[in-house]
Image: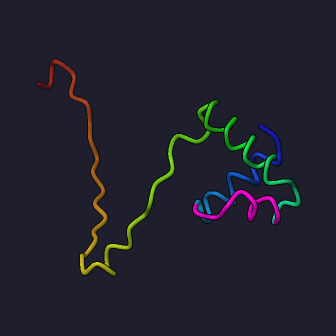
Amino acid sequence: MDELDCKILYELDCNCRQSNAAIGKKLRVNKNVVNYRIGKLLENGFIDRFYAVVDSPKLGFQTFRVYLKFSILDEAKR
């Protein structure tokens, strides 16, 4: 993975719905290069999937952040 791959990942992280042409224009490379690089990033596991992040409050839902701490009990404590 080189600097261009990192820049492509950054652009996808900011907005994964933008076209390869738009990413290419920002990074000053051809859209075919972006397409090839994204394919390689998918193939090599650097990109696992693309997904939507839903804005829950806009749908009328409240969101909560919950922190849990787990500890592993050894056999003697069980």
- Vertical arrangement, residue 76 with respect to residue 19, above or below: above
- Residue at image point 32% right, 73% down: 56
Q: Quadrant of the N terminus?
A: top right
Front residue of 76 and 62: 62
In this rendering, position of residue 57 left or right of residue 18: left
Residue 55 % position (x, y)? 38, 73
Magenta-span inclusion, residue 18: yes
Point out residue 41 in the picture as x, y percentages from the top left corner.
67, 38
x, y (%) of residue 20?
A: 71, 57
Q: Main secondary structure of the magenta part?
A: helix
The single residue placed furthest to the right in the displayed view is 28
In the rendered image, which quarter is residue 7 located in? bottom right
- Vertical comparison of 30 with 2: above or below: below
Q: Is residue 73 left or right of residue 11?
A: left
Which contiguous range is marked in magenta? 17-25
Which image quadrant is residue 23 in? Answer: bottom right
Question: Looking at this rendering, what residue extends furthest in the left direction?
Answer: 78
Image coordinates for residue 36, horizontal then vertical, percent? 75, 41
Q: In screen coordinates, is 56 left or right of 29?
A: left
66 within the magenta span: no
| Above/below status of 36 relative to 66 | above
Quarter of the image with the C terminus in it = top left
Q: At x 74% / y 42%, what residue is drawn?
A: 37
Side of 47 where 35 appears, left or right: right
Question: Number of labelled discs?
Answer: 0
Q: How is the image coloured?
A: rainbow
For the point 76% across and 45% down, the residue is 5
Residue under the image location 28 percent in, 71 percent down = 63
